[in-house]
Image (cartoon, rainbow, N blue to C red):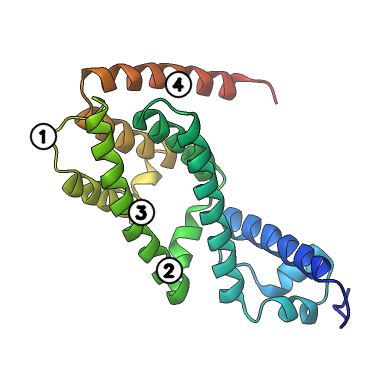
Amino acid sequence: MMIESGKVPSQREELRERIMETATEAFTTQGIKCITMDDIAAALGISKRTLYEVFSDKESLLRECVLKKQLERDEYLKKVMDQSNNVLEVILAVFQKGIEAFHRTNKRFFEDIKKYPRVYAMMQDRHNSDSESTISFFKTGVAQGIFRGDVNFAIINLLVREQFDILLNTDICAEYSFVEVYESIMFTYIRGISTEKGAKVLEEFIKEYRQNRIIATTRPI
């Protein structure tokens, strides 16, 4: 399959989307380093030349895959915010979405991404921007009576980010599952900043969340 001059833009855009979908799946489930442009072209049934006509190199492709995922998360967050009664419901919905994503992501992805400095820098910039939004978000939770007003959310947010960095860069997951550690960080964090009202919302969520997880793990394959 070759892209010829005169082809309608929608066909090229459709191919672009297919490439990003295939590459994202490969990068997240197997890691980035072990996946080559040849692998992606072969998986799509296209020539490597066609692939390079759409994406000039692997890092450019990776960058677009990451940007697409960020956009999807933004759209999901907006949808959840429109349907939620308070900020804690939003945080818990995003947490659950994050767990689903971690289940599908190989730890190698997080290790390999650092070897692509432009993409890694872009992700770090996004994390910094998200941190500012998160602090403002938690202050809204204080006004709603969900979170305590005597908490320095800038410090808490920084500590949580550091904990996730430790999670990704140590062998703790050799003893405990990635999801188990992630849950422990998030639930402890939210309990510590919640008021009595917020704690009730959290405990109801945890009860339902764990019940659903038990059902999922015992369901016949």
Q: Nearer the viewer, residue 95 or 25?
A: 95
Residue highlighted by disc 1: 150
Q: Nearer the viewer, residue 36 or 139?
A: 139
Left/right placement of residue 167 relative to residue 43 reads left
Image quarter (top left, top right, bottom left or bottom right) of the N terminus: bottom right
Are the two marked residues, 2 and 4, in contact with CB atoms closer than 8 angstroms?
Answer: no
Are the two marked residues, 2 and 1, in contact with CB atoms closer than 8 angstroms?
Answer: no
- Which mark's residue is nearer the viewer, 2 or 4? 2
What is the spatial separation of the Cα atoms under label 2 and label 4, in whole angstroms? 35 Å
Determine the secondary structure under disc 2: helix
Between discs 4 and 3, the one toward the N terminus: 3
Q: On the image, which quarter does residue 55 sit in?
A: bottom right
Determine the secondary structure under disc 3: helix
Q: Looking at the picture, does residue 156 appear above or below residue 221?
A: below
**Mark 3 Cα within 10 Å, few/some/many (few <14, many 20+)?**
few
Are the two marked residues, 2 and 3, in contact with CB atoms closer than 8 angstroms?
Answer: no
| Callout 2 amino acid | Met
Are the two marked residues, 4 and 1, in contact with CB atoms closer than 8 angstroms?
Answer: no
Residue 189 in view, yes or no: yes
**Mark 2 Cα within 10 Å, few/some/many (few <14, many 20+)?**
some
Residue 116 in view, yes or no: no
Residue highlighted by disc 4: 210
Instruction: Tell me the residue at 57%/45% (across/down).
Output: 104
- Residue 87 appears at what percent x and percent y? 35, 32
Residue highlighted by disc 2: 122
| Callout 4 amino acid | Arg
Left/right placement of residue 46 relative to residue 166 reads right
Between discs 1 and 3, the one toward the N terminus: 3
Residue highlighted by disc 3: 130
- Residue 208 appears at what percent x and percent y? 46, 17
What is the spatial separation of the Cα atoms under label 4 and label 3, in whole angstroms? 28 Å
